[in-house]
Amino acid sequence: MISTFGNMPFKYTTRNMNIMAKYLNMNSVLCQGIGEPSDGHEVTCGDFHGTDGLAGIADSMAIKYGVTDSMIATNKDLAYLASEINQKDSVTYIAVGPLSTLANLITKYPETVSHIKNVYIMGGGITHFNKEGQTEYNFAGDGPAVQTVLSSALDITIFPLDITEVYASIAKTEIDSMDFSKYPEMKSILLQNYASNVKYTKDATGCVIHDCLPVLYYYNKSKFSIKDYKLTANNIGHIEEAADGKLIHVATDMEKDFLVNTIKESLK
């Protein structure tokens, strides 16, 4: 698991990565990726996910699961990540934030490209956008990194806003009907997302967890429809079709209720 900046500054996302790894009892090496975009501009979504990125419960979760500064200091770095990838025959890289870490990885350690079989990315927009310049939050976070990744030799599948805005939504009534007794903190996180949707987008139907879709695709590709596009990217993260663009697989549809049913199953 790799931390990067994104919905919150790097110090928060790195701490939250350590918290969630303990919370979910994940047997995973934790690495600190790149903490700022290529051009140094600040990216933030304010308090959409709470002031700590975890619905305001990061401090209590850190105490509960024993996450300390000394533990975070043992997280590995980009060089370690590259060495681990180079020992594998086939790696699937899933990116759900700005692409700064992946861009740095393939630029500084180009040998990793031949070991990364697939890259699944939540980001971009074909006709749907949520940032100025007709782009999407993750891609706007580091436009030059998007250019680097999308022009590379990697086999890439993206999950743009066009699909996540339709299929990554969980109705408030569904949240209320779920049994969170095994993972009570998850309800707080989903309800924070719902409250922010109401506050900032005026959408009172539920929460939207865009980043789940590439993970769901990794586990069950049969639930998705994919279309190939030739895409180029500019330095602010806007993508568009072009005859000389890189062939990118784009998720266009997902089986209805796949996300909700998977979450319900995981809560058991």
Image (spheres, rainbow, N blue to C red):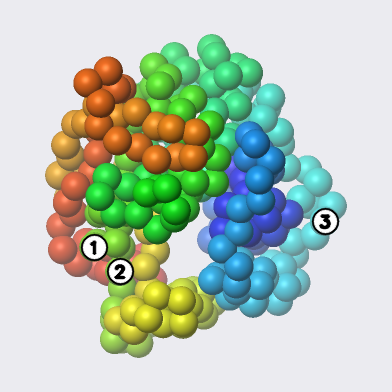
Give the image location of residue 209, x and y in percent.
39, 64
Q: Residue at x 58, y 25 (%)?
A: 105
SS state under label 1: helix
Q: Residue at x 29, y 54 (%)?
A: 128
**Residue 200 in the image: above or below residue 241:** below
**Residue 97 in the image: above or below residue 180:** above
Residue underneath mark 3: 69
Mark 3, Cα crowd under 10 Å, few <14 / some 14-19 / many 20+, is few
SS state under label 3: helix
Quarter of the C terminus within the rendering: bottom left
Residue 268 is at least partly visible in this image: no
C-alpha span from label 2 to label 3: 34 Å
Is 24 positioned to the left or the right of 131 in the image? right
C-alpha span from label 1 to label 3: 39 Å
Give the image location of residue 253, x and y in percent.
17, 51
Residue type beneath disc 3: Asp
Q: Residue at x 55, y 40 (%)?
A: 142
Q: Residue furthest front?
A: 133
SS state under label 2: strand
The tag earlier along the polypeptide, 1 or 3, is 3
56 and 221: which is toward the camera? 56
Is 58 positioned to the left or the right of 88 in the image? right
Give the image location of residue 145, x and y in percent.
53, 32
Residue underneath mark 1: 166
